[in-house]
Image (cartoon, rainbow, N blue to C red):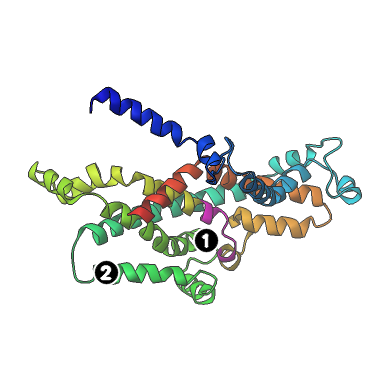
Amino acid sequence: MSAATLSVSGRRSRKNNSPRNLKKEGYRVSQKTPWGNPIVYFFSLLLVAICVSPVLYIIFGGFRTNSQITNDPAGWPNPWNAQNYISVVTSSTFWIEMVNSIIVAICTVVGVVVLAVMVSFAISRYHFKMSKAMYSLFSAGLMFPMTVAITPLYLMVRNLGLANSLGGIILPQIAFGLPQAIIILVPFLQSIPLELEEACMLDGCSRLGFFWRMALPLAMPGVATVGILTFVSSWNSYMLPLFVLNTENNYTLPLGVQMFSSQHSADTAQVLAFTSLAMLPALICFTIFQKKIVGGLTGAVKG
């Protein structure tokens, strides 16, 4: 049979198997809409609305007055009033708490990323008897949240002389952030082919050189994911600062929001403005780098 005959028969078979002919013969043919399933879109939009509505209410509530909130709690600002945000931004208390939160978040991210990368590299690339047990130990750390250990943790921080200081927040957050970071980074480092490491060794590269030149750049998606998740978690931390910090000059923003709400309980609009400004950095960070977070977690699951 020639090639022309085969091509003609192939076109006839594709023509006979078209959705219209199959439908005439009694087969059930599923019709795919170009926009997908509308039910999935409906529930997706409903879920997005449920998640976004409280955030938008807080942000827009800061542009309203107390009388507007009292008369119409769910209404739009009419007229728009930016005085609440101006008064919060011009206050020194807000910026002191902002600087404290930035210091704590950055130090926590650096500590978690540096230690987690080194520990993960040792567990994933070095073969020793206790490697699996060490990985299991860090995995078990996820089952013990900071809230459960807050009382002995505070006693330890006080005995170390770190009470009422930012160091008393940074060190425990690094310790409790390591298990999650190691679980994410170990699969990334394990997925690096052994042949690549052997090739680097043949070229005269040491283990430390392989770590800096090859392993760390290849694991950057996981490192970025760990850094972003640690930053958001540190920024939103409330329980530990509540126990450790005593003076207002050392307050972080989550604790400052609670104290500001207590002091200005009658001024609801200004409390909403302070709350929206306090959550804005973490919200922006999470929104910008959400693709890196999803990509890093996906890579960790595949590894």
* Residue positioned 66% across, 55% down in the render: 256
Is 269 in the magenta? no
Where is residue 93? Give x, y as percent. Answer: 67, 49
Contact (Cβ within 8 Å) of mark 1 with mark 2: no
Q: Mark 2 Cα within 10 Å, few/some/many (few <14, many 20+)?
A: few
* Residue positioned 33% across, 70% down in the render: 136
Label 1 secondary element: loop
Where is residue 77? Give x, y as percent. Answer: 83, 39
* Residue positioned 46% across, 73% down in the render: 156
Can you identify the residue that label 1 sits on?
A: 165
* Left or right of 190 in this view: 82: right
User: Which of the two residues, 34 or 274, is positioned nearer the viewer here?
Assistant: 34
Q: Nearer the viewer, mark 1 or mark 2?
A: 2
* Residue 132, numbered label: 2
Query: Which is nearer the N-term, disc 1 or disc 2?
Result: 2
Which residue range is magenta in the image? 232-240
* Left or right of 37 in this view: 289: left
Q: Is residue 233 above or below residue 283?
A: below
Q: CA distance from mark 1 to mark 2?
A: 36 Å
Where is residue 26? Give x, y as percent. Answer: 54, 45
User: Which of the two residues, 288 or 299, is positioned nearer the viewer here?
Assistant: 299
* Tag 2: amino acid: Lys
Magenta-colored segment: predominant secondary structure: helix
User: Which of the two residues, 215 or 118, is positioned nearer the viewer here?
Assistant: 215
Q: Quadrant of the N terminus?
A: top left
Where is residue 295? Give x, y as percent. Answer: 42, 46
* Tag 1: amino acid: Ser
